[in-house]
């Protein structure tokens, strides 16, 4: 047995655990399609396109924000270099390097897939796994989303379908 620790676990232990009113929903964003993802570095095709994914995501966020009466804040992937209010998030705030605290202080999280799920699990945050019709074409992406959903018993939502937020 090799005793070791992870960066995520160390950050959790160092986090400030003050109770804060949960005033937002956080999207834990992936690297693609805005910036290069691991798959593209390995020469694999990424099925999400900037033009379609972010437009569909914005439409989903508008409905989500209206129903829950909370804003969506973006927790940027570490490889993403944009901050503040990038155009592809249609005026929503995007923050880099603060994912742990964003998750800790959120109402719930949205993600396609991320190692930062460990933070949400630690803080017992509801997790909604999102995907689109573009993801459905990608066996790799959709199988990871399905496996994570099954392992952590989390809801998965196709952002392109009609959604009943009451469930």
Image: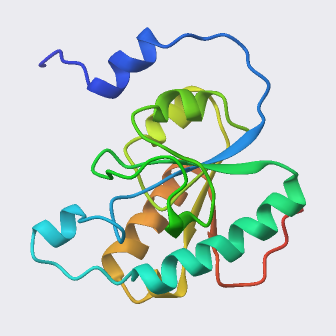
Vertical placement of residue 93 versus 58, above or below: above
Whether residue 101 sits left or right of residue 97 in the image: it is right
Q: Based on the displayed image, in which of its 4 quarters is residue 97 positioned? A: top left
Q: Can residue 167 be seen in this view?
A: no
Number of labels in the image equals 0
Q: In which quarter of the image is residue 17?
A: top right
Q: Report x, y in % for residue 143.
A: 39, 72
The quadrant of the picture occupied by the C terminus is bottom right
Who's the residue at 42% across and 79% down the image?
Answer: 50
Q: Which of 10 and 20 is in front in this view?
A: 20
The relative height of residue 54 versus residue 136 in the rendered view (above or below) is above
Q: Residue 145: percent from the left, percent from the top? A: 46, 65
Residue at the spot 36% in from the left edge and 68% down from the top edge: 34
Residue at left offset 29%, top offset 64%:
35
Q: Is residue 156 visible?
A: yes
The residue at the point 44 percent across, 62 percent down is 147
Q: In this view, does 103 lie to the left or right of 113?
A: right
In-front residue for pair 94/18: 94
Q: Where is residue 98 in the image (x, y as percent from the top left)?
A: 46, 31
- The N terminus lies in quadrant: top left
Q: Quadrant of residue 159?
A: bottom right
């Amino acid at each position: 047995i090799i005793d070791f620790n992870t960066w995520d676990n160390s950050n959790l232990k160092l986090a400030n655990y003050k109770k804060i009113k949960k005033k937002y929903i956080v999207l834990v964003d992936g690297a693609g399609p805005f910036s290069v993802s691991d798959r593209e570095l390995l020469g694999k095709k990424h099925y999400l396109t900037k033009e379609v994914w972010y437009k569909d995501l914005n439409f989903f966020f508008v409905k989500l924000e209206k129903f829950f009466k909370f804003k969506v804040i973006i927790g940027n992937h570490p490889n993403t270099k944009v901050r503040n209010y990038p155009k592809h998030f249609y005026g929503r705030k995007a923050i880099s390097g603060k994912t742990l605290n964003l998750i800790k202080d959120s109402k719930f999280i949205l993600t396609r897939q991320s190692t930062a799920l460990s933070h949400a699990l630690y803080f017992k945050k509801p997790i909604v796994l999102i995907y689109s019709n573009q993801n459905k074409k990608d066996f790799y992406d959709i199988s990871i989303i399905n496996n994570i959903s099954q392992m952590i018993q989390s809801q998965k939502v196709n952002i392109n379908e009609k959604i009943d937020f009451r469930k």
